[in-house]
Image (tube, grey):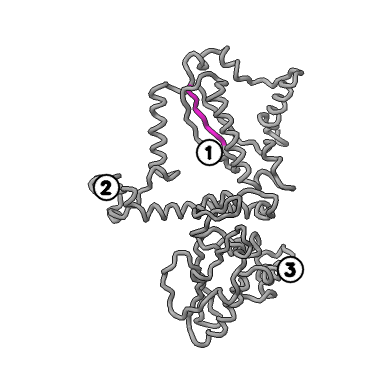
Amino acid sequence: MYLYDPAFAVQLRSRRAPELNPDLIHSLTLMLQESNPLIQYYLTASELFATLAHSEDNFRILLNSQLRLVEERGADPRRENLPTADEVAMILPEEYESGGFRDIVLARSMNGEDGPNSWSLINPNHPSYRPRHYVLLFPYGEPGWHWGRSRNNREGERPDKSLHQRAFYRYRLHTRLDEPTTLFRVQRLFQQFVVDAWAVCDQNKLAWLRSHQKELRADLYNGLADVLDDGDVDLAQVGRRVVLPSSYVGGDRFMQKLYQDSIPIVRRFGKPSLFITFTANPKWGEIERELLPLQTAADRPDLVARVFNLQVRELLYQIRHDEIFGPWLGGVWTIEYQKRGLPHLHLLVFLKTDHQFLTPANIDRFISAEIPCGGDPTSQELRGIIQSTMVHSHCAGGNG
C-alpha cells in the first residue's frame, strides 16, 4: 500500500477496519511517510514507475545486494546511518532471473490501466523483511537479521564471528531498560511475530540440511534396495529424498532416538514409580512481576515459556538431586501444550524399590486429597494454593 498517496491509503485501511479512528490512521500514515526509509524507497519506485510505464509493458524493481539495509548496531554510530533514497532500487526492464537468495523483487503488472498489481514475496532472510512485514512495530525501518551479521561484545568491538539467526531472535525476545517495549505490547501480533521468527529459523535449518546431504552421509541411512522393498514409498521420489538427522528437533529420527533411549530404562528398572503432571501457572509470581501494565500471561508467550522452563529445571533438580521422593534411578518426560497455550510436563520417575509407593502409608506421606485446615503458616500457604489452583467452581452453574 505504500505506492498510494496518504489520503487514499487511509481510505483503504478504513475499509478493512471501519472501527479504527481515521484521524489516528492518518497520523500514523504521515509519521511512517516521514520516518520510515523503506516507505520513502517505494515512493521513489512509484515515481520511477510513472517515468518508465510508457516505454515498458512489464518491469520489476530489485533491491540488490549493494542496496540492502545492513546497518549493524555497534560502538561507532556512523555505521548506523541509513543509505539515501537514491541508492534503493534499480529498474530492470527484462525478466528477473533468480540469482540472489536474499533479494526483494517487487513486480507490477502494466497490462491495463485497471489491471491488478502483482507482488512477489520478500525473502525472510532479507534485513528489511521484518520492518516491511511489521511496519508499526519497526516504524523507522530498523533492519533485522541478515547473512554475515556480526556479534558485538560488551566493549563494542566487533569480533570475527557471525551472529546466528536463532541467537538474534532470542536476544530480541527480551525487554531492556534502554529499548522501547512496543514489540511486547501488541498481543496477538506479538504471538505472530514469535511464530514467524521460529518458522524462519526452522526453514533455514531445513534448507541447510537439504543442501548438505553429502556431509551428513545421508546415503548411508537407507539404500535404494530398502526403498524398493517398502511398498508405501513413492518411487518417483527415489534418489530425491532429504534425510533429516537425529539432531533435527522434531524429526522422525529425533523422536526415534528419544524412544530408543527411553525403552532401556524401562527394561532395566521396570515400570515407573511416579507419573507426575506439572502444569504452568499463569499466576506465578515470576510471570506477574514481569508483565507490562494491562497485560495478561496470554499476551507474553515468551515469558510463560521462559518461566516454565526454569520451573521444570527446578522440579527435576529437587527430584534428582534433593531426592524429595527417594533415590532417583531414571526419568522420562515430555512437554505438551494445553488447548489455550499453557505448557505442561508429563514425567515418569523411576525410584529404588524400597522407596516406591507400594503401601498406603507411603502413599499418604506424599499424596493427600484433603484441604489443609491447620493454623500454622505452612498449612495456610498450602490451603491458598489448593483453593486457587486445584478446586473447580460449581460445574452446574446456573443450570443446577
Residue 345's image quarter? top right
State the quadrant of the C terminus.
top right
Q: Which mark is residue 53?
A: none
How many other residues sit within 10 Å of disc 2, few (<14), some (14-19) or many (≥20)?
Answer: some
Which span of residues is magenta-colored?
A: 344-350
| Label 3 vs label 2, nearer the camera | 3
Categorize mark 3 by other alpha carbons within 10 Å: few (<14), some (14-19), many (20+).
few
| Cα–Cα gap, marks 2 and 1 | 33 Å
Where residue 152 sits in the image (x, y, percent)?
57, 53
* Mark positioned earlier in the residue sequence (1 or 3): 3
The kind of secondary structure element at disc 1 is strand
What residue is rendered at 67% in x and 54% in y? Answer: 186
Q: Nearer the viewer, residue 203 or 142?
A: 142
- Residue under label 1, please give it: 336
Q: Is residue 31 above or below residue 300?
A: below
Task: Look at label 2 and name its amino acid.
Answer: Val
Instruction: Decide whether residue 112 is among the magenta residues.
Output: no
- Placement of 246 over or under 79, stated as above or below: above
Q: Tell me the number on the disc at residue 227.
A: 2
Q: Is residue 362 visible?
A: yes
Question: Residue 145, image x and y in percent?
Answer: 54, 58
- Secondary element at image label 2: helix
Which amino acid type is shown beneath numbered disc 3? Ser
Residue type of the residue flagged with mark 1: Glu
Residue 101 location, x and y as percent? 44, 64
Q: Earlier in the sequence, mark 2 or mark 1?
A: 2
| Residue at the spot of label 3 | 27
Residue 199 seen in render: no
Compared with 59, 353 (above or below) is: above
Residue displayed at 66% across by 51% down: 184
